[in-house]
Image (spheres, rainbow, N blue to C red):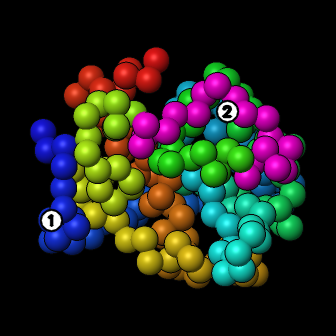
Amino acid sequence: MQKKISKDEVNALPLHAYDGEVEIINTPAGYRKAVEEISDFTLLGFDTESKPSFTKGIKNPIALVQLATDDKVYLFRLPKGDMPKELKKILEDDNIEKIGIGIDDDLNDLKRIGVKRPKEFIDLNKLATKAGFHNTGARNLSAMLLGFRISKSAQTSNWEREELTEKQISYAATDAWICLKIYEKLWQYDYSDVNK
């Protein structure tokens, strides 16, 4: 298996994005319903998005939390960085593994809005490094393990806008979904337990 890849090799691969069901949640009833559905899963893809700040020392609060199951991605909008108690319950649930990529900043941002750090967050960058991969990050790992690249072009867009664009929705859903796919592939190659 390839454990090192160049930027040119990544760019030569076909572009792929999540194309399944996406639910955008921004009401108390929506949070309750989504969390009830998610509670049945023991493994979730995870990511967050914040409006970029171009001022040194200024960091905007989390505007979106993405959680992915095998067949659906949930996009939780956070008004003014407030953490709904229903979503907090899932993020703090040690019975549900949350799989992300480069998640230290995400977890620190969650702590700032009252989410304690549970044990069951797995960082694929750390997992891949321990497994001997030279390149990490969503684009590199998807290229080496899944044979396609993903777009990161919406990463620095305005995640606080009233209505998310189709490009933002696709990007956000793909970012959480890809974590599950990469983890599943690492599991097939017996790398998923290197962090245990």
Q: Name the residue rendered at 83%, 62% in the picture.
A: 81
User: Which residue type carries mark 1?
Assistant: Glu
Is 65 part of what is drawn in magenta? no
Q: Which quadrant of the view contains residue 15?
A: bottom left
Task: Measure the alpha-carbon separation of dots 1 and 2.
Answer: 39 Å
All told, the count of numbered labels is: 2
Is 108 or 185 nearer to us in this picture?
Answer: 108
Q: Name the residue rendered at 67%, 32% in the picture.
A: 39
Looking at the rendered structure, the secondary structure element under dot 2 is: loop
- Percent x, y for residue 182? 34, 43
Q: Is residue 9 above or below residue 123?
A: below
Looking at the rendered structure, the secondary structure element under dot 1 is: helix
- Percent x, y for residue 186? 30, 33
* Residue 80 in view of the camera: yes
Is 154 or 69 nearer to us in this picture?
Answer: 154
Magenta segment boundaries in residue numbering: 109-126
Is 115 part of what is drawn in magenta? yes
Q: Name the residue rendered at 63%, 63% in the picture.
A: 49
Q: Which mark is residue 39?
A: 2
